[in-house]
Amino acid sequence: MADDLDLRTAPRLAERVLDLVRCGASVAVDTSAVAFVDCCGLAALERCVAEGRGEVSLEPVGVAVERLRHLVELSGRAVPSAG
C-alpha cells in the first residue's frame, strides 16, 4: 500500500485484508510506502492482525507506521507485534 493510511483509507484496507483472510489467504501488509498514518490507520492494522488469526503480518513495516507504533507504546498502550 502507498500514500496515507488514515480515517479515509483505513476502513477499506481492513475490509480488503479481512475478506482475503476469510477466503483462506495469508496476507502480508507492506506499509513501507505509507507516508502518513493516523490513529485510525493504526487501529485498522491492529484489527487486521487481531482478527486475522495469525494469517496477517505487517512486513515490511514502514517508517510512518513504526513511528506511530513507538509513540503509542510510549503512552503505555499495547500494540500488536509486526509479525
Image (tube, grey):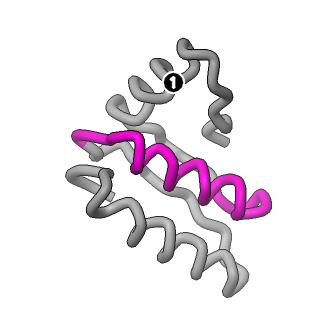
Residue 44: in magenta span = yes
> Residue drawn 65% across and 53% down?
49
Q: Which residue lies furthest to the top in this view?
A: 74
Q: Residue furthest right?
A: 53
> Residue drawn 54% across and 12% down?
74
Q: Position of residue 35 (x, y in %)?
A: 22, 40
Residue 6: in magenta span = no
In the picture provided, is 82 more to the left or to the right than 41? Answer: right
Q: Which residue lies furthest to the bottom in this view?
A: 23
Instruction: Please say if 30 is above or below 32.
Output: below
Question: Which quadrant of the figure contains the C terminus?
Answer: top right
Q: How many marks?
A: 1
Instruction: Please say if 75 is above or below 22.
Output: above
> Residue drawn 59% across and 65% down?
27
The stretch in magenta equals 35-56
Determine the secondary structure under disc 1: helix
Q: Where is residue 51 in the image (x, y as percent from the top left)?
A: 71, 62
In the picture provided, is 56 more to the left or to the right than 5? Answer: right
In the picture provided, is 2 more to the left or to the right than 27? Answer: left
Question: Which quadrant of the figure contains the N terminus?
Answer: bottom left
> Residue drawn 72% across and 82% down?
24
Amino acid under disc 1? Val
In the picture provided, is 58 more to the left or to the right than 63? Answer: right
Q: Where is residue 17 in the image (x, y as percent from the top left)?
A: 53, 70
Q: Residue tagged by mark 1?
A: 72
Residue closer to the observer: 75 or 41:
75
Instruction: Please say if 64 is above or below 46.
Output: above
Q: Where is residue 60 in the image (x, y as percent from the top left)?
A: 48, 42
Q: Characterize the local packing of mark 1: few (<14), some (14-19) or many (20 or more) Cα atoms within 10 angstroms.
A: some
